[in-house]
Image (cartoon, grey):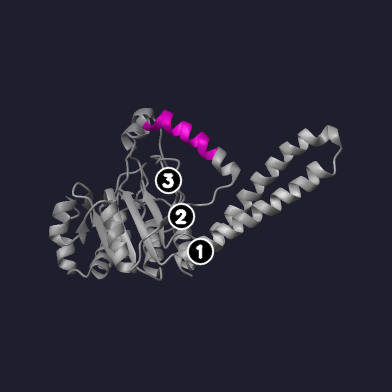
Amino acid sequence: MNDTTDALGRGLLVALALVVGTVAGWLLFVRYPGDLADLLGVLLLLATVGIALRVAGNIASAQFPTYNVAEVTVEGPITRDGGGGPVPSSPTTPGADDVVEQIQQADDDPAAEALLVKLNTPGGAVVPSDDIRLAAERFDGPTVAYATDTCASGGYWIASACDELWARRGSIVGSVGVRGSRFTATDLLDRAGISYEQLTAGEFKEAGVPFTDLEDDEREYLQGLVDGYYEEFVERVAEGRDMDPEFVRSTEAKVYLGRDAEELGLVDALGDREAVEERLEERLDAEPAVEEFTPAESPLARLRGGAAAAAYALGQGVADAVDGDAEFRL
């Protein structure tokens, strides 16, 4: 269906709902009640018309969509549930599972002919980042990634699955690397007169716990895990961006300004949001109309999010100084 037909269909549906709602409201609340109920009937009539229009609008939007590009946003540290680990991200940040669900919904939506992935993230956990990358890779249609402030590490892992990556001149892009961090509390325990003992089975079961110093073989073992993730990262970027793996390694996990990243081939083009939409118009051979896909939330989840937002605003300054994450992160 073309745009004219869709607009006509939406208009007819809303007009029909208006007529039905008006007639039904008049019959139910004005015509049949006695004179004392007339005033209340008029008020109820107006309420019925408003509800009818709202329902009709929702139905019209579903039956005659006005968009052809689905947009999903990856913002803040990438985690499974959006909680940000011990360092809290913004409570409104969707987790990787939510982002994957949004991309899958867009892929199932016949109106969404292209996918726009908006990236503003310093990276995060390895597997959640790869889940989003796979979902973007499987989208049936053109996929364009757009970096705003930061597209680093896990964000770049995701972008490597898209057909194109755009950035601003001042965007921070790159950081093809992996880190595995741990803190050590052995001196603190000694000063407190506390001893630590753990019964385990398996030579490396205790490797990485903060209450003992690393042995050389444990350090080698953990470094091997980091190296394994790094090689996978390099492979994904080289394959997705059509680059020489040795060149990817030569970046040494550096970040680059957008203009430098473009010169190195780490991004395809520079531009603002308007330029990205112009590129989508070329890819679709039609004017792009972007619809942001967001995770569905229950009223309880929204209430919980509001409480989290208040706690986040109160504790952000303190939390920003904490970095005790022992996960392997991009």
Query: 53 above or below 305?
Result: below
Q: Which residue is mark 1?
A: 6
Q: Which residue is mark 2?
A: 293
Report the front residue among 309 and 180.
Answer: 309
Instruction: Assign the magenta stretch its main secondary structure.
Output: helix
- Which label's residue is closer to the chain start, 2 or 1? 1
The answer, for residue 225, to whether it is visible in the render is: no
* Quarter the C terminus occupies: bottom left
Q: Which image quadrant for residue 246?
A: bottom left
Residue 116 shown in magenta:
no
Q: Nearer the viewer, mark 2 or mark 1?
A: 1
Residue at 55 percent of width and 41 percent of height: 302
The percent position of residue 11, horizontal first and vertical second, equals 56, 57
Disc 1 crowd rating (10 Å Cα; few below 14, some 14-19, many 20+) is some
Q: Nearer the viewer, mark 3 or mark 1?
A: 1
Direction from residue 271 to residue 161 in the image, left or right: right
Which amino acid, mark 2?
Phe
Q: Which residue is mark 3?
A: 93
Cα gap from disc 2 to disc 3, whole angstroms? 13 Å
